Amino acid sequence: MPKLCNKCSKNDAIYLRQYSGEFLCKKCFVKSVEYKAKRTISKFSMIKHADRVAVAVSGGKDSLALLNILKNTLRGIDPELIAITVDEGIQGYRDESLNIVKNFCSMIGVENKVVSFSDLFGISMDKAMEIRPSEKISSCSMCGTFRRRALDLLSESTGANVIATGHNLDDYVQTFLINLFAGDVERIGWTYPDPVEYGTGGLKKIKPLMEIYEKELVLYAIHTNIPFQTEECPYKDESIRSAFRVHLNNLEKIHPGIKYNAYNSILKIAKRLKESPTNIGNTTLTTTNLSTDNVISQEHRKCEVCNRDSSNKICSVCRTLNILTEGN
Ligand SMILES: [Zn+2]
Ligand SMILES: [Zn+2]
């Protein structure tokens, strides 16, 4: 006999939320995910009335779920929404997701703007992979560096003041572990979700799904009939992130709720570190962590090449382009 939903006591449950022991029906499950995102947004004052929010939508489950949630749940705040998409130039992979995003956006009535690596940086990801010195730069770090800049530029060109990304709770905990094991203690403080303005245009970055398990976002997308790309990027490297992901998922199976507990602890640590920046974290700049430009460093600088905000003399994008063209 199927279990009844613990929330409405009417419908059959389709999901057991292991960490709380709740059985949920489809309707209550979908509502609970949307409520969680809404609560995160209000807890950290992520979106205000009349904000123009650029939602970074790749075609994967997280970003499409985010767009759907923002579209459905922010009555009263009513921000202007625009979906922004980066075409990295990965043949056979990105084309499919570009179509998924385009169709979904037109279905829910949200404008979609696309920009490509080739247009912005003069090189596609396919080409960059062909010529990169692989010992100096990993595929994901190179792509991430370009993608973050592309999202900034695209948001600025649309007049948005907020960029929303689909990072989930699993991503957040993994990022903490990556920083911890790399000795980047200071960087942990930068991950505190309180939005900080950066750049000349005063953009803010927010992660409204950061308190939701990845597994629940897959289910949310399925139960709300969101079409999403399941194929993995052909250039995905077996990074330390994948190792932490597997390890955390195994732990969660044995100890339901452990990821959520870790998330809450990390939040407290990040808050302390953000409030009192210290010298304990010597951020070492290697080819695997080139992404510090968006953080307001104590020493405010401009990149000598492109003149955008940078925590170093030359920003990560220009350094990466240099490695690709000059090999250094
Ligand atoms: Zn129910
Ligand atoms: Zn630069």
Image (cartoon, helix red, strand yellow):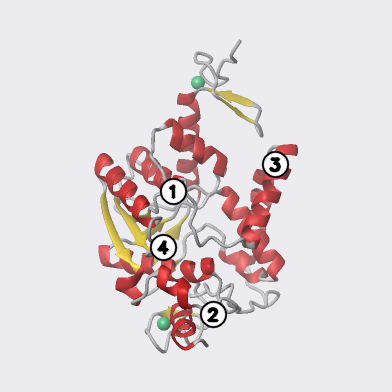
CA–CA distance in space, label 3 to label 2? 38 Å
Q: How much space separates mark 1 and mark 4, taking CA atoms?
A: 22 Å
What amino acid does circle 1 point to?
Gly
- Do labels 1 and 3 touch, CB within 8 Å? no
Report the side of 151 relative to 103 (left or right).
right
What residue is pinned by disc 4?
A: 204
Of the image marks 3 and 4, the number of the one nearer the N terminus? 4
**Residue under pointer 1:** 60
Asked if disc 2 is less than 8 Å from ligand 2, the answer is no
Q: Nearer the viewer, residue 90 or 321?
A: 90
**Cβ(mark 3) to ligand 1 < 8 Å?**
no
Query: Mark 2 = which residue?
Result: 133
SS class, disc 3: helix
SS class of the residue under badge 1? loop
The residue labelled by disc 3 is: 252
Q: Position of residue 151 (x, y in %)?
A: 37, 64
Q: What amino acid is labelled 2 in the image? A: Pro
| Front in this rendered view, residue 50 or 322 | 322
Of 263 and 102, nearer the camera is 102
> In the image, what residue type sits under mark 3?
Glu
Q: Position of residue 182 (x, y in %)?
A: 69, 69
**Circle 3 or circle 4, nearest the eye:** 3
Residue 61 can be seen, yes or no:
yes
